């Protein structure tokens, strides 16, 4: 591991605030810092690029060649890497490396993480302890995995957790955990199980909670069934730019399962399974923050009812004045003081 790309990665790892490394070609290397892309001075040998890709694929026991041109995996430090190879990209393989803020291991270790005050952190911990079901929503690069990881690490150590990811990204310090990985074909196996295949199998593994790193397809159908049949406190993330868009996205993903189900039934499944949606975004300075917390409250006719618990306004996450309908459960099971919302 001594070629030019490994040296570049090692040098960039020493710099603070870099969240992405993007290699579009030998002389076209960019980093993301504070939500902005910055081109750096680089001249990487083409042979080093190809050797790097093969080394990382082998580390992940996966294949990246003309028959398997897309590769997802991890670097030794846990960073996520995606490669798309020629002939599906012009000129040079495209490499995307997403760095994670590994020092954010808990809410306590990083004050003001995601723009949260201690009072909001207490609320989040109560939601996890009360085993309410959570969806983390946000666009690309806003910290969905990091935030999901913070929530997961609040789960009591006595519980059994099954996680399902396309590529292993979560960093979890719990003793009774099984980590499942779908996605690219493994080097030593002909099997290629989808996320949905793994969710179905998970139901036979006696989990207390099921965590899907990111829901992208028909696996949502099976996850919602699990949430509705005894696997409270489960979590996932969804790619959406607002909480309202997230609900529409969930409807679409549910229907990808291929069943002819009326939309009103789909919405009933969603509202009976999901309790809270946390919307992530970036503030005016490019920092990752929670922009909205909404509670899913049920239905009125064909319409999903939600209420905003908090919205980010004037740089602060502000309580909107109405306590969650789940306040009693948050108090009884999550330890939240009965008068918690009176003091905002």
Image (cartoon, rainbow, N blue to C red):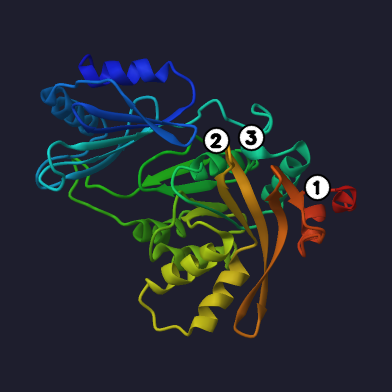
Find the distance from the CA under tag 2 to the CA under tag 3. Answer: 25 Å
Disc 1 crowd, CA 10 A, few/some/many (<14, 14-19, 20+): some
Disc 2 crowd, CA 10 A, few/some/many (<14, 14-19, 20+): few
Q: Which quadrant holds residue 62?
A: top left
Find the distance from the CA under tag 1 to the CA under tag 3. Answer: 22 Å
Residue 33 in percent (x, y) is at 45, 30
Q: Is residue 129 left or right of residue 323?
A: left
Q: Closer to the N terminus: mark 2 or mark 3?
A: 3
- Residue denoted by label 1: 335
Q: Secondary structure at mark 2?
A: loop
Mark 2 and mark 1 residues within 8 Å of each other at the beta carbon: no
Q: Secondary structure at mark 3?
A: helix
- Residue positioned 59% across, 42% down in the render: 283
Q: Nearer the viewer's eye, disc 2 or disc 3?
A: 3
Mark identifier at residue 226: none
Find the distance from the CA under tag 2 to the CA under tag 1. Answer: 23 Å
- Residue denoted by label 2: 175
Given residues 146 and 126, the one toward you in this image is 146
Residue 166 in percent (x, y) is at 36, 48
Given residues 233 and 94, the one toward you in this image is 94
Q: Does residue 62 appear in the picture of this structure?
A: yes
Quadrant the N terminus occupies: top left
Q: Secondary structure at mark 1?
A: loop
Q: Does residue 207 appear in the picture of this structure?
A: no
Q: Is residue 199 left or right of residue 210?
A: left
Q: Closer to the N terminus: mark 1 or mark 3?
A: 3
Residue 206 in percent (x, y) is at 51, 54
- Residue positioned 55% across, 25% down in the render: 103
Mark 1 and mark 3 residues within 8 Å of each other at the beta carbon: no
């Amino acid at each position: 591991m001594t070629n030019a790309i490994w040296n570049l990665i090692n040098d960039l790892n020493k710099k603070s605030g870099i969240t992405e490394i993007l290699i579009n070609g030998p002389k076209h290397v960019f980093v993301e810092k504070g939500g902005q892309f910055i081109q750096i001075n680089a001249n990487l040998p083409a042979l080093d690029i190809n050797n790097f890709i093969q080394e990382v694929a082998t580390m992940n026991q996966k294949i990246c060649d003309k028959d398997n041109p897309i590769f997802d995996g991890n670097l030794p430090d846990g960073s996520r890497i995606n490669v798309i190879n020629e002939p599906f990209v012009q000129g040079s393989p495209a490499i995307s490396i997403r760095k994670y803020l590994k020092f954010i291991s808990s809410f306590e270790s990083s004050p003001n993480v995601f723009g949260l005050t201690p009072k909001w952190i207490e609320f989040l911990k109560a939601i996890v302890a009360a085993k309410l079901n959570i969806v983390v929503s946000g666009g690309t690069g806003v910290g969905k995995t990091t935030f999901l990881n913070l929530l997961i690490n609040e789960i009591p150590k006595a519980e059994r957790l099954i996680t399902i990811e396309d590529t292993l990204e979560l960093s979890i310090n719990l003793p009774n955990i099984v980590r499942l990985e779908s996605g690219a074909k493994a080097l030593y196996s002909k099997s290629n199980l989808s996320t949905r295949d793994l969710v179905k199998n998970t139901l036979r593994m006696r989990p207390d909670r099921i965590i899907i790193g990111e829901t992208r397809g028909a696996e949502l159908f099976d996850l919602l069934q699990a949430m509705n049949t005894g696997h409270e406190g489960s979590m996932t993330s969804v790619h959406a730019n607002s909480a309202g868009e997230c609900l529409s996205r969930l409807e679409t993903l549910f229907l990808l399962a291929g069943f002819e189900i009326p939309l009103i039934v789909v919405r009933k499944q969603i509202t009976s399974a999901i309790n809270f949606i946390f919307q992530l975004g970036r503030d005016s300075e490019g920092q990752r923050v929670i922009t909205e917390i909404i509670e899913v409250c049920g239905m009125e006719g064909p319409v999903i009812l939600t209420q905003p618990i908090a919205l980010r306004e004037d740089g602060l996450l502000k309580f909107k004045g109405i306590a969650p309908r789940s306040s009693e459960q948050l108090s009884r099971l999550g330890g939240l003081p009965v008068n918690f919302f009176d003091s905002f």
